[in-house]
Image (spheres, helix red, strand yellow):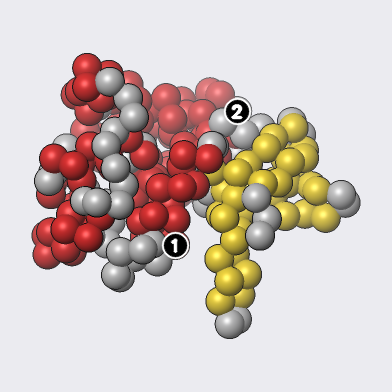
Amino acid sequence: MIAFVSGPVAALAPTTAVLEVGGVGMAVQCTPNTLSALRIGQQAKLVTSLVVREDSLTLYGFADDDERQVFELLQTASGVGPRLAQAMLAVHSPDALRLAVSTGDEKSLTAVPGIGKKGAQKLLLELKDRLGAPLGTGAHLAAQRSAPGPAPWSEQLHAALVGLGYAPRDAEDAVAAVTPQAEATAEPQVGVLLKAALQTLNRAR
């Protein structure tokens, strides 16, 4: 198993980072939050999970061991593959997922693309004894979940665009362009907004 990869960031895409490891470019699938912390040319270390299929080998990267552990635990639930597990972590932090499962918060799970009401109910039952209790304090988690919508998503989106090589001013314009879309959603999803922002930037070129 490849436990982590470390090296300079060679390239960034909406869902992938390429790290140069010993002269080899390692493509790693990451959430927007993880990608937003990376910069082309700078050293980075990503904790990884290798998913082996008959026709592919896919490396998923995470900011820390806790995120990777939750990613792997989520896949122990029936119907949850690596893509859906990563989508869940793109929308919620590991502790937010623990809190949602421990409190039976169906609404939080249905905020993830690909999870409907029945799927959320099934996941709550299967994951209740697997994810464990939240690691953070109750006050911190409550603040995290009730934080004003625009600030967290806009900062993450701006950082992700700059990390992809766009100028800060262009990134600000793209964030402004997708703000109406974000404000129309109860829980803005950075991954969805990133795609919309990239389309806006491509049209502007």
Residue displayed at 44% across by 62% down? 82
Disc 1 crowd rating (10 Å Cα; few below 14, some 14-19, many 20+) is some
Q: Helix, strand, or loop for circle 2?
A: loop
- Would you place residue 86 above or below residue 77 in this image? above
Q: Amino acid at mark 2?
A: Ala
Q: How far from the left and from the top, in percent, is residue 39?
A: 66, 32
- Would you place residue 40 above or below residue 17 in this image? above
**Residue with the mark numbered 1:** 82
Q: Amino acid at mark 1?
A: Pro
Front residue of 131/152: it is 131
Quick check: marks 2 and 1 in contact, CB under 8 Å? no
Disc 2 crowd rating (10 Å Cα; few below 14, some 14-19, many 20+) is few
Real-space Cα separation, disc 2 to disc 1, in angstroms: 32 Å
Q: Helix, strand, or loop for circle 1?
A: helix
Q: Which quadrant would the N terminus be assigned to in this image?
A: bottom right
Left or right of residue 162: residue 72:
left
- Disc on res. 94: none
- Disc on res. 167: 2
Q: Which tag, 2 or 1, sits closer to the chain's start?
A: 1
